[in-house]
Image: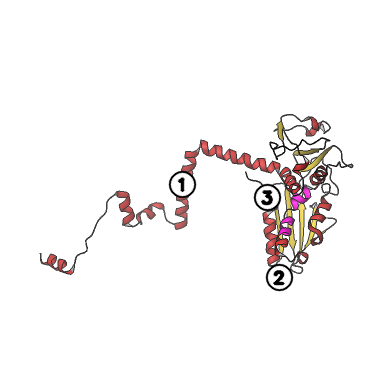
Amino acid sequence: MILLQSHSRYLLEILSNRVQNVEKGVELDCNWVEFGDIRYHIQASIKSPHLLLLSVSLPTPPPETVFFGGLPLGAIEAVKAAYGPVIQILDPPRDGFNLTMKLNLTKLPPDEETKTSLLVKIASLREVVMGAPLRVMLKHLASRTVALDMDGLVALVHRPTESFFLVTQEFVEARRTAGLVNAPPCSWSPSPPLELKGAAVEVLFANAGFVSFVLFPRHVEGIKLDKTVWNLSTFHAYVNYHVKVIQMFCLIQIYGANFQIVLRRIHAHSNEAACGVPNSALDRAKPDKEKAKKTGQSRSFKRLSLKEARSGLKS
């Protein structure tokens, strides 16, 4: 089972290279998109090489989702708690972005292990921002309390064409037994579950149905919280990846022989391109030893002594 990493590998690579080469003072200006729905921009100048401006643009939320200042509920607090004095949130953010942060590399911790851990956390900005409202509510679940300022049905920012709801209910958790599985129960239905009774009608239509997870306090206690938030936030990407893998596997099973022919032709073409001569010319240039292996014929030679050679000449 392949799970997505919470941090952006490209952003982590940029941050690590910048920290290692900050004295060189190279200008930096990079734009890229990840997950098909979130855009990053990171910039640094030659005059202030230790300062980085990192901006992030979130996907357009569904209409039922509530944003505060262009960000999900609790995002600002989550960013400050995760990065501390290393970052400064700029208000307003850069045009076209939901959040802009100024990173001060001189305030990174001196310990290498702690520094690397913080850089990975900064590269996990997507999880920190988009998972903030889910994290707030799951913290209440872990402490077995109810968020007084939230309704029982809350719409979370996810993807523009998909709705993501969190329903809070009062219940008594079942006793732990040896046979009780640790994974949260998961179910699918083609029609909206009863818990979405209060949701807007326009969001209750789905081509692929509705997937529901039931979370208990044991699923979000301690260090499990961040992992649960990330797995739920990236559930669509996880399913989409495995669906594509299954599709490719089926194609290989059905058209396996044709795939082998195509691969051999690609390999042959790459050999020609690398050498600059056709494969037929390469075959003719092979040593006699290789040709002999193909034809099954070979020649043998006996080394004569000087005496044998002279007698042969006389005869």
Q: What segment carries the magenta color?
A: 117-130
Which is more toward the observer, 270 or 109?
109
Dot 3 crowding, Cα within 10 Å, few <14, some 14–19, many 20+: few
Q: Amino acid at mark 2?
A: Glu
Kindly identify which residue carries mark 2: 23
Q: Position of residue 68 (x, y in %)?
A: 86, 47
For the question of whether residue 21 can be seen, the reply is yes
Check the image and report above or below for 216 versus 74: above
Q: How is the image coloured?
A: secondary structure
Q: Position of residue 156 (x, y in %)?
A: 80, 42
Q: Amino acid at mark 1?
A: Arg
Counting residues from the start of the chain, the first of labels 3 and 2 encountered is 3
Q: Amino acid at mark 3?
A: Gln
Check the image and report above or below for 267 versus 212: below
Counting residues from the start of the chain, the first of labels 3 and 1 encountered is 3
Counting residues from the start of the chain, the first of labels 2 and 1 encountered is 2
Kindly identify which residue carries mark 3: 5
- At 13% across and 66% down in the image, what residue appears? 313
- At 55% across and 37% down in the image, what residue appears? 250
Kindly identify which residue carries mark 1: 265
Check the image and report above or below for 243 versus 45: above
